[in-house]
Image: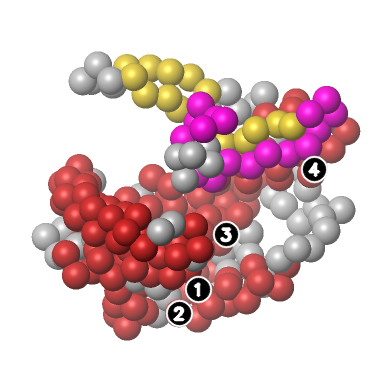
Amino acid sequence: MRQQMRWSTYKKVPILLAKVDGGYQQMNDSSVIISALTSYMHNPSEGLTAALKYYPSIEFKDDEGNVKSEVMNRHFLMFGESMPKGKTKESINEERKWRKWADEVLVHTLSPNVYRTKDEALQAFNWFSEVGDWEKHFSKWERLVVIYVGAMAMLMIGKRLKKRHNLKGDVRLSLYDENNFWLKELRKKGTPFMGGSEPNLADLAVYGVLNSIEGCDAFKDLEKNTKIGPWYYGMKAAVADRRGAVVQ
């Protein structure tokens, strides 16, 4: 991964390269990518590069003096004066609220759960190896080093993240609680998705978070102990149905 990303000063994933006039435009951060592309699709005459200017990155120092960076407006959609068909100010605000929740709350329950124990950490890395076709990209010894060293490192990191994000002693309960919070709001709406009969960007954000752990023991426990399955697999089908579609 590091060798593949040597060309970029930004080292996290995902990164999207979009072809624009004069070359390629690099886009970082999943939420920024979604916000910028959605804004661009609403008003393509401005161009993608112009849309990205609404999402500037700033640097600052935290309380411990460490330099941090933050993207402004990352969950905001820039529609200008014209509201998209079928959208209201209230629905846009609700969508943004849940996208922010997915990034700032739900996602932080994952690592402490996926890497809760040594066995679960190893199971997760073996699954990553399987779905990532690591056997095709690494020698056997390299793959085993990544699996075992990576699992042990993430086991320790997961413990620190549990404390940092104030998760419960049994971190599974925090994972269940946040997913039940999402499901409670869905029941209030009485629709298959937060977007109604069709998914919106809030659904996509939550699905993206959970999809990253689908093959892990934590996700299996989540299915058994909550009713996330119908919504999740409904989203999976909706995403698969649109894969490769040309957006006009």
**Earlier along the polypeptide chain: callout 4 or callout 3?**
4
Determine whether label 2 and label 3 are within 8 Å by CB. Answer: no
- Does 86 appear above or below 15? below
Q: Residue at 58% across / 41% down in the picture?
A: 15
Disc marking residue 232: 1
**Earlier along the polypeptide chain: callout 3 or callout 1?**
3
- Does 135 appear above or below 66? below
Q: CA distance from mark 1 to mark 4?
A: 27 Å
**Which residue in the protein does label 3 denote?**
204
Q: Is there any visible trace of residue 86 in the rendered image?
A: yes
In magenta, the rendered stretch is 6-23
For residue 84, side relative to residue 108 (left or right): right
Instruction: Tell me the SS state at disc 1.
Output: helix
Q: Is there any visible trace of residue 184 in the rendered image?
A: no
Disc marking residue 10: none
Depth check: give the residue in front, 24 or 47.
Answer: 24
**Earlier along the polypeptide chain: callout 1 or callout 4?**
4
Magenta portion: prevailing SS class: loop
Disc marking residue 229: 2
Q: Residue at 71% across / 66% down in the picture?
A: 243
Q: Quadrant of residue 216?
A: bottom left
**Which residue in the protein does label 4 denote?**
42
Determine whether label 2 and label 1 are within 8 Å by CB. Answer: yes
